[in-house]
Image (cartoon, rainbow, N blue to C red):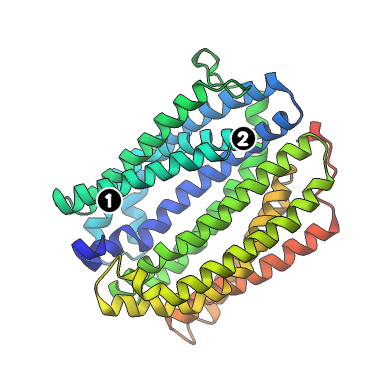
Amino acid sequence: MGRFVGKEALAAVGGGTAVYLNLLISFFIGLTSGAGIIISQFFGAQNESETSRSVHTALVMCFVGGLIMTALGLAATPWVLRVTKTPEDIMALSLTYLRIFFVSMVPMFMYNMTSSIMRAVGNAKVPLYILIAAVFTNIFLDLLFVVAFQWGVAGVAWATVASQAESMIISLIILGRSKTSVRLQAKKLTCTPHLLIKMLRLGLPAGIQATFYCLSNMIIQTAINSFGTITIASWAAYGKIDAVFWTMVSTMGVAVTTFSGQNYGARQYDRLKKCMRQAMLITLLMTASVTVIFLLTGSYIFRLFTTESVVIAGGMQILHFLAPWWVTYVAIEVLSGIIRGSGDSFIPMIITLFCVCVLRLVWLFTAVPHWNTIITVLACYPISWSITSLLFFIYWFSGKWLHKPLEHI
């Protein structure tokens, strides 16, 4: 979009705006992850009645939660943009983008939940096809609304709303036609209290973990914002590349969580350890590959989002510093995913809160004042990734996360 409406618009839909959205979205997705775990465990245990009730409880929870998130997001937006020191030259654009974007909360959460349900029963291809279709719809509408209609950041936001609505509608139709125990039936849409409690007990730690992860990113974004609009735009442009890596590893995290839940429900514990070894190897190879590709082609990719050389140069500086450290994050996603799938969400939350929040804040308030550069600010990422990975390995090899009775989940 920066190619058509300038670096201000690019900064307005990236930077602090993106971090703020990630905060809200990550909390709710983390919260609802408990539903996916419960469904996969019941499915693995071949308990069809509880699987069905879990599905309908999860969908009701998502719909209500999406409405609440829309209201909270709209109410808090002006305050958050001021707190994160959003520059005045992009304040109005950021407000416009966010106020439209929050319309997509219900469709977004419903799609994510239906995708989680499909994956919980081993159907990973259909959510991927729906996502691919939504991406192409988003790109087409971006070009239509921004280039043809000249709607600017509002066009980008409305394109997102439309693509999310498309994903929700298609996924609900597919779920309604399912021949398995996860079939959506309108007459069964009700909230089963004991299942909701189980979902929240597993999902709340993950939601808190995701929230504090994003809060630390908001604090980091505040530090980045102090370097001005060009740096914000460079960080936003880098975020487009960075999102490819995060999507890749988070997808593996979702996959191993589902696999873990199914096999834990079936009491096939040995498969969890095999899953860890294979998932680590696959994800490390994919991470190494995309790292090399982006380091070699980054300058060309940045030109897809902006034509301003100073923004490209800043983005390349960030890319060259952070991309080689991506490998240190792989263990976090794989190990925490398997551990959560087995029903242990509390310890992963504690590890992440300490490393992501405490360590990053200590770095920002001790090192950055002495060496006030963008690289010093961003150094908190590889430091926290490395230490978090180490702690997850220690907890994994302790074995304390395994062999909890299923009825206690």
Q: Classify the position of the N terminus by image quarter.
A: bottom left
| Location of residue 212 in the rendering, given as x and y in whole percent from the top left corner | 55, 56
Q: In this view, does 6 lie above or below 376?
A: above
Identify the image quadrant of residue 202. top right
Would you call the spot at circle 1 few (<14 residues within 10 Å), some (14-19), or many (20 or more)? many
Which residue is more in the foreground, 229 or 280?
280
| Residue lying at 72% horizontally and 37% vertically, measured from the top left | 262
| Location of residue 16 in the rendering, given as x and y in whole percent from the top left corner | 37, 61
Residue 37's disc number: none
Name the amino acid, label 2.
Ala
| Location of residue 265 in the rendering, given as x and y in whole percent from the top left corner | 77, 34
Would you call the spot at circle 2 few (<14 residues within 10 Å), some (14-19), or many (20 or more)? many
Q: Distance between the residues labelled 2 and 1?
A: 30 Å
* Pointer 2 or 1: first along the chain: 2
Identify the image quadrant of residue 3. bottom left
Q: Is residue 306 left or right of residue 208?
A: left
The residue pinned by badge 1 equals 97
Which residue is more in the foreground, 329 or 303?
303
The residue pinned by badge 2 equals 35
Name the amino acid, label 1.
Tyr
Dot 2 lies on which element?
helix
